[in-house]
């Protein structure tokens, strides 16, 4: 089974008998001889049997390893931090942005509120295990009519004072209440894992958005330098045109290339502005109040990716743990639905004092009370119980299928990231070589163009190749960084094997 062993959260058995003894004196209880009856029912409630099947989470046998491996020559190390995994990139600005997102993102706040709500629901389910005690106190003065009988009698006045405790308790003979509590506990734990996944996804999105902006900064800087080169070439061609060394075709060619590069520069600046707005939303800020300074000198961090990633690391993915816990919650609901076939036993009663004079209220002779079980057993409901059982069984099968799908999806995401990083390493090296060669050719073309050794058309071709290869190299850097983040997210937030089993409940 993929998920580690975890011990179900068990609520401590509350000594209900002791609680009632503290509320009502032992002597008064003995007066009604209810103590043996209450103790017997307490034993039945906490020692009753759980009816219905006990469904388990089906075992899923994962593959021994992953299909894709990182190409040879890539630095390998399992040195990524666990909780603060983004710090491996060594960027202080990025660290601040991630921490700000955690503190101010509405997504995190909403997810945490859902956890609190689920915990409250679990508390409600737990409270049903114990008796409900209500205190009722009253004081009234009553005048009785003297003309209610055949003969008229003098009207009478009377007082009545009373204090009483009322008891209502479902004796969980068939495990219905315990199963509902078990389901609520598992659902609350699942919501906690959903919160973990929201946090993991948010951090990954912030890191990816930040790298996207830095790649755009680098691309914008390349385009600006290219614009300066184009402007210089345009001035040179115009001077040559005046002296008759260049014709109108060359001048028009340089004008076209400059205008096209300027347009592309504005396009990238627009993309950068939109990316900054998106990052502002991720960190919980208004775009108008958020700005990320341009860093034209930014260099991508070197990545160290582990060469062997055991599939057991998927055990710590919050969404997989969440899916498994939801299966456990559905399994417990099946048992609760089966309990409807059996009689429902409720212990009810009240005990207190009533008297006509306030001064006599707490005398032993003023004591009254009653206590006893009540049995309710449905004998016909037109298939309602059968439908409830069928519904809970179907929900369980549905969640089992979704659990398996979540596992397959997780494996697919890790495989995709590993395959991308494997091929991107070779692609990045090739694009770097192409960019360096194109830049060298462009530099030579500019020198020769000044001396009239190459045509303007040849110069434009070499500069265009240098621009395109430089942009492609930079964009591939960004893709590689994004895929490294995706691999981290797919593995549940880090690459260190020591995290496996950290979330086990012994």
Image (cartoon, rainbow, N blue to C red):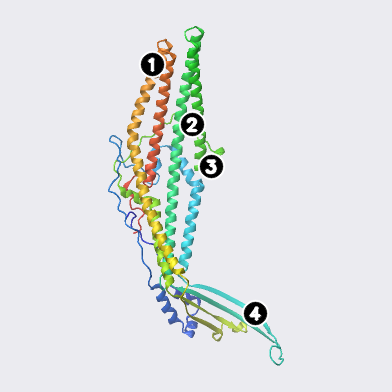
Spatial CA distance of label 3 from label 2 is 18 Å
Tell me the quadrant of the picture where the N terminus can be found.
bottom left
Between 6 and 448, which is closer to the camera in this rendering? 448
Q: CA distance from mark 3 to mark 1?
A: 48 Å
**What kind of element bears circle 3?**
loop
Residue at left 40%, top 60%?
Answer: 396
Mark 3 crowd level (few <14, some 14–19, many ≥20, 10 Å Cα): some
* Disc 1 to disc 2, C-alpha distance: 31 Å
Instruction: Say which residue label 2 marks.
Output: 294
Quadrant of the frame with the C terminus: bottom left
Label 1, label 4: how far apart the Cα atoms are:
108 Å
Q: Are the residues at dot 2 and dot 4 in contact (C-beta closer than 8 Å)?
A: no
Mark 2 → mark 4, Cα distance in angstroms: 79 Å
Residue 444: numbered disc: 1
**CA distance separating discs 4 and 3:** 61 Å
Q: Which mark is residue 140?
A: 4
User: Eyeballing the image, is 382 above or below 146?
Assistant: above
């Amino acid at each position: 089974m993929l998920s580690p062993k975890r011990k179900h959260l068990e609520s401590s058995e509350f000594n209900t008998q002791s609680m009632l003894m503290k509320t009502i004196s032992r002597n008064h209880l003995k007066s009604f001889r209810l103590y043996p009856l209450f103790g017997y029912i307490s034993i039945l409630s906490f020692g009753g049997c759980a009816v219905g099947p006990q469904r388990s989470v089906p075992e899923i046998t994962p593959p021994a390893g992953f299909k894709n491996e990182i190409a040879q020559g890539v630095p390998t190390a399992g040195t990524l931090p666990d909780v603060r995994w983004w710090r491996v990139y060594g960027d202080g600005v990025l660290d601040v942005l991630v921490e700000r997102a955690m503190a101010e993102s509405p997504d995190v706040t909403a997810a945490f509120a859902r956890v609190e709500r689920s915990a409250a629901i679990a508390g409600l389910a737990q409270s049903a295990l114990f008796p409900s005690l209500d205190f009722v106190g009253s004081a009234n003065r009553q005048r009785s009519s003297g003309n209610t009988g055949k003969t008229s009698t003098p009207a009478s006045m009377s007082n009545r004072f009373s204090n009483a405790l009322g008891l209502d308790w479902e004796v969980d003979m068939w495990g219905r209440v315990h199963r509902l509590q078990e389901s609520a506990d598992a659902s609350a734990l699942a919501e906690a894992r959903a919160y973990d996944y929201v946090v993991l996804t948010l951090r990954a999105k912030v890191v990816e958005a930040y790298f996207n902006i830095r790649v755009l900064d680098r691309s914008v800087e390349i385009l600006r330098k290219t614009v300066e080169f184009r402007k210089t070439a345009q001035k040179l061609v115009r001077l040559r045109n005046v002296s008759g060394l260049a014709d109108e075709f060359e001048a028009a060619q340089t004008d076209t290339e400059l205008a096209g590069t300027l347009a592309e520069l504005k396009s990238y600046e627009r993309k950068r502005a939109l990316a900054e707005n998106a990052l502002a939303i991720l960190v919980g800020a208004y775009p108008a109040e958020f700005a990320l300074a341009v860093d034209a000198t930014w260099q991508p961090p070197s990545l160290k990716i582990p060469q062997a990633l055991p599939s057991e690391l998927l055990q710590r993915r919050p969404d997989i743990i969440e899916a498994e816990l939801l299966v456990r919650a559905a399994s417990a609901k099946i048992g609760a639905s089966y309990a409807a076939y059996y009689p429902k036993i409720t212990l009810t009663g009240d005990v207190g004092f009533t008297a006509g004079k306030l001064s006599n209220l707490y005398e032993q002779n003023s004591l009254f009370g009653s206590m006893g079980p009540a049995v309710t057993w449905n004998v016909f409901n037109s298939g309602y119980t059968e439908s409830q059982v069928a519904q809970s069984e179907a929900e369980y099968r549905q969640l089992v299928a979704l659990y398996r799908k979540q596992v397959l999806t997780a494996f697919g995401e890790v495989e995709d990231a590993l395959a991308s990083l494997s091929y991107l390493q070779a692609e990045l090296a090739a694009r770097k070589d192409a960019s360096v060669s194109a830049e060298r050719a462009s530099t030579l073309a500019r020198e020769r163009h000044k001396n009239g050794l190459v045509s303007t058309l040849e110069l434009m071709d070499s500069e265009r190749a240098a621009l395109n290869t430089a942009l492609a190299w930079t964009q591939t850097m960004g893709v590689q960084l994004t895929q490294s983040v995706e691999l981290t997210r797919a593995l549940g937030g880090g690459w260190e094997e020591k995290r496996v089993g950290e979330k086990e409940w012994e």
